Image (cartoon, grey):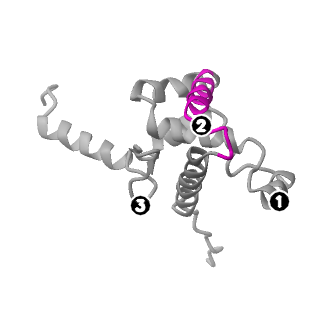
């Protein structure tokens, strides 16, 4: 048996990785005229490490969202997801897993520079819309474990 790796195997592995990294969303998104990279598994993991709150907002935050259209930390969440999809390099995405706080600071600074914290701006309105689309599609595409019925043996 050879220790050498067959090139066809490598190509297969690369293709498999591309499939794994596919976006959780159905189509490419744009924000501020820029095509966003897919919200892939690695970007989702980085967002979690950076403190993404979407999906874990408590009852009080949910009530605030219903009243105001924003939950606590939502502007930061928008900054994180859009930075990961619009600006972050693969190296920055990987680094976010190890140091989420520094990556989140970088995302917030980038978001400020791009008008994402000015809730009256077109940049924010478009960012809000794109973020909500990405999160809704991501949430809808999650798999749910099947409930097993008790066996009758």
Residue under circle 3? 26
First to last magenta residue range: 102-120
Marking on residue 25: none
Q: Earlier in the sequence, mark 2 or mark 3?
A: 3
Residue at numbered disc 1? 67
Q: Where is residue 33 in the image (x, y as percent from the top left)?
A: 41, 46
Whichever of callouts 2 and 1 sits on the residue coming sooner in the sequence is 1
Q: Is residue 81 above or below residue 103?
A: below
Residue at image coords 39%, 53%: 28
Tell me the number on the disc at residue 115.
Answer: 2
Q: How far apart, in angstroms, are the residues tagged by discs 3 and 1?
A: 29 Å
Q: In the image, 62: left or right of 110?
A: right
Front one among 108 and 91: 108
- Residue at image location 74% in from the left, 56% down from the top: 69
Secondary structure at badge 1 equals helix
Circle 3 crowding by C-alpha within 10 Å: few under 14, some 14–19, many from 20? few
Binning the other alpha carbons within 10 Å of mark 1 as few (below 14), some (14 to 19) or many (20 upward) gives few
Q: In which quarter of the image is the C terminus?
A: bottom right
Q: Does the magenta stretch include residue 115?
A: yes
Q: Which residue is drawn at 47% across and 30% down?
A: 93
| In this picture, residue 102 sits left or right of residue 9 | right
């Amino acid at each position: 048996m050879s220790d050498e790796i067959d090139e066809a195997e490598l190509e297969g592995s690369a293709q498999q990785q591309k499939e794994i990294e596919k976006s959780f969303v159905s189509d490419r998104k744009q924000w501020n005229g820029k095509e966003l990279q897919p919200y892939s598994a690695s970007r989702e993991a980085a967002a979690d490490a950076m403190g993404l709150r979407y999906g874990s907002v408590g009852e009080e935050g949910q009530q605030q969202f219903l009243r105001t259209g924003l939950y606590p930390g939502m502007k930061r969440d928008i900054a994180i997801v859009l930075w990961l999809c619009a600006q972050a390099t693969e190296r920055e995405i990987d680094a976010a897993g190890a140091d989420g706080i520094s990556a989140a600071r970088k995302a917030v600074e980038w978001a400020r520079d791009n008008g994402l914290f000015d809730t009256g701006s077109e940049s924010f309105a478009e960012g809000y819309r794109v973020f909500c689309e990405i999160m809704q599609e991501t949430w809808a595409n999650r798999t749910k474990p099947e409930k097993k019925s008790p066996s009758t043996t």
